Image (tube, rainbow, N blue to C red):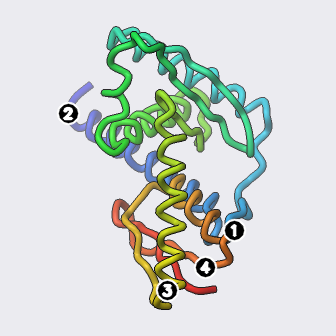
């Protein structure tokens, strides 16, 4: 394969990743916390996504010589994969990275592997060593703090940029607290603005 073909293949993969992010934004569904507009994905396809993704991750862990067990779960129209290591397992933290950056990149690579194998875009969610659970607790407190600030002075609060999956979590918490939120910005600068309902 020559350099032009490599460039074209990378561009196509990049477009596919952007399309997957766009499909996550549809799932985010305007900021009302529902999955309106998201197509119902058959259970069999979600299970296939999980199997393909698990095979991809197993191969990656073998290459990196990192021990970890892979758990697959399907819920809420998404496939969730968790890579868990025992207390002696080394290297899994490097797959999370600072602020989850490596985890997000690995999730996108896994989605691309599923797309390549099945021809279907995936909204799968990847977790490593419970990082997302801890991050979810943190996001709940961020949302609660933002609501408290809006309550105190009435001005909208702009949060730091985050992934569509994380924005969905914050939108849900804000809605549960009776306040409004919406996403603003593009790409890596997309963030949530919390305001009074």
Closest to the camera, between mark 2 and mark 4, is: 4
Instruction: Say few, some or many: other residues with alpha carbon within 10 Å of mark 1 (under 14 / 14 to 19 / 20 or more).
Output: few
Q: Earlier in the sequence, mark 2 or mark 4?
A: 2
- Going 41% across and 69% down the picture, which residue do you hit? 159
The correct choice, above or below, for 18 with respect to 85 in the image is below
Q: Which residue is mark 2?
A: 3
Q: Earlier in the sequence, mark 2 or mark 1?
A: 2
- Going 50% across and 91% down the picture, which residue do you hit? 154
Closest to the camera, between mark 2 and mark 1, is: 1
**Most foreground residue, 160 or 177:** 177
**Most foreground residue, 47 or 72:** 72
Residue 95 x/y as whole percent: 35, 28
Instruction: Say few, some or many: other residues with alpha carbon within 10 Å of mark 4 (under 14 / 14 to 19 / 20 or more).
Output: some
Asked if the residue at tag 3 contacts the one at tag 2, i.e. Cβ–Cβ closer than 8 Å, the answer is no
Residue 162 x/y as whole percent: 42, 58
**Most foreground residue, 36 or 180:** 180
Q: Which residue is mark 4?
A: 180
Instruction: Say few, some or many: other residues with alpha carbon within 10 Å of mark 2 (under 14 / 14 to 19 / 20 or more).
Output: few
The correct choice, above or below, for 139 with respect to 82 in the image is below
- Going 42% across and 10% down the picture, which residue do you hit? 67
Give the secondary structure at mark 2. Answer: helix
Closest to the camera, between mark 4 and mark 3, is: 3
Closest to the camera, between mark 2 and mark 3, is: 3
Distance between mark 2 and mark 4 Cα atoms: 48 Å
- Going 68% across and 26% down the picture, which residue do you hit? 48
Q: Earlier in the sequence, mark 2 or mark 3?
A: 2
Q: Which residue is mark 1?
A: 176
Q: Which residue is mark 3?
A: 152
Instruction: Say few, some or many: other residues with alpha carbon within 10 Å of mark 3 (under 14 / 14 to 19 / 20 or more).
Output: few
């Amino acid at each position: 394969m020559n350099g032009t073909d490599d460039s074209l293949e990378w561009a196509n993969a990049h477009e596919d990743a952007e399309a997957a992010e766009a499909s996550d934004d549809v799932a985010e569904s305007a900021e009302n916390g529902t999955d309106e507009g998201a197509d119902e994905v058959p259970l069999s396809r979600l299970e296939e996504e999980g199997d393909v993704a698990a095979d991809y991750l197993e191969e990656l862990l073998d290459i990196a010589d990192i021990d970890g067990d892979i758990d697959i779960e399907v819920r809420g129209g998404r496939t969730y994969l968790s890579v868990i290591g025992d207390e002696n397992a080394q290297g899994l933290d490097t797959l999370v990275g600072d602020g989850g950056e490596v985890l997000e990149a690995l999730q996108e690579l896994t989605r691309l592997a599923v797309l390549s194998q099945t021809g279907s875009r995936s909204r799968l969610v990847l977790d490593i060593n419970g990082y997302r659970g801890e991050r979810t607790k943190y996001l709940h407190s961020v949302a609660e703090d933002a609501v408290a600030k809006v309550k105190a002075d009435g001005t909208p609060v702009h949060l730091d940029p985050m992934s569509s999956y994380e924005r969905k979590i914050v939108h849900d918490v804000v809605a549960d607290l009776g306040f409004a939120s919406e996403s603003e910005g593009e790409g890596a600068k997309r963030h949530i603005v919390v305001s009074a309902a």
